[in-house]
Image (cartoon, rainbow, N blue to C red):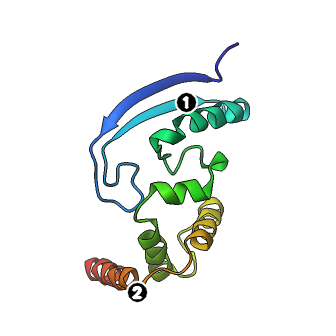
Amino acid sequence: NRLPYYNFEIRTTNQDDAFLSCCQSRPGMWIDFQAKAEISHEFFYEMTSMLKHFGYRKHWAKGMDNSDPSYVIEQFPDITKFIEAVKLIDPVGKFRNEEGESWFQALDLLTGDCTESIKEETVVLREQLVAEE
């Protein structure tokens, strides 16, 4: 029985402080499987099940179609700050595509209202971005 991928790489990255980084607040080890999407759904489901107890974080542009939004929220400590920043910076969704919008809506519903302090931090972020333009 052959595995449904044709190549893979393993690499490490130091921790950072970006809202949605896989390495936010911790260093990371990446295991990147390059696979044909039409035959790999079961394989990726099995891989994510095995890696779940390690607290894996998926790359936002890879394989999110078989991800559980509630698990994603648990893995990204600042996701609520990101959602509020999106609401303030891009309130009408001009910079979102269909898939990004569906994720944004799901994450927004699951996180609920954010606290006043997060809103204040986001207003400061937006002011900084506007000042840079």
In the rendered view, would you say 132 is above or below 4? below
Q: In this view, does 68 lie to the left or right of 89?
A: right
Callout 1, which amino acid? Gln
Measuring from the top left, give residue 21's x and y in whole percent: 39, 54
The residue shown at (52%, 22%) is: 7
Task: Please tell me whether residue 43 is drawn above or below residue 25 in the rendered image.
Answer: above
Q: Which mark is residue 47?
A: none
Which sits in the foreground, 94 or 8?
A: 8
Report the residue marked by disc 2.
116
Tag 1's secondary structure? strand
Q: Position of residue 53 (x, y in %)?
A: 50, 40
Q: Whole-Å distance between the Cαs marked 2 and 1?
A: 42 Å
Residue 13: quarter of image: top left
Image quarter hosting the C terminus: bottom left
- Residue 34, horizontal then vertical, whole percent: 55, 30
Q: How many labels does the image show?
A: 2
What residue sits right under mark 1 in the picture?
A: 34
- Give the answer, above or below, for where 102 lies relative to 125: above
Above or below for 28 versus 108: above
Residue furthest front as drawn: 53
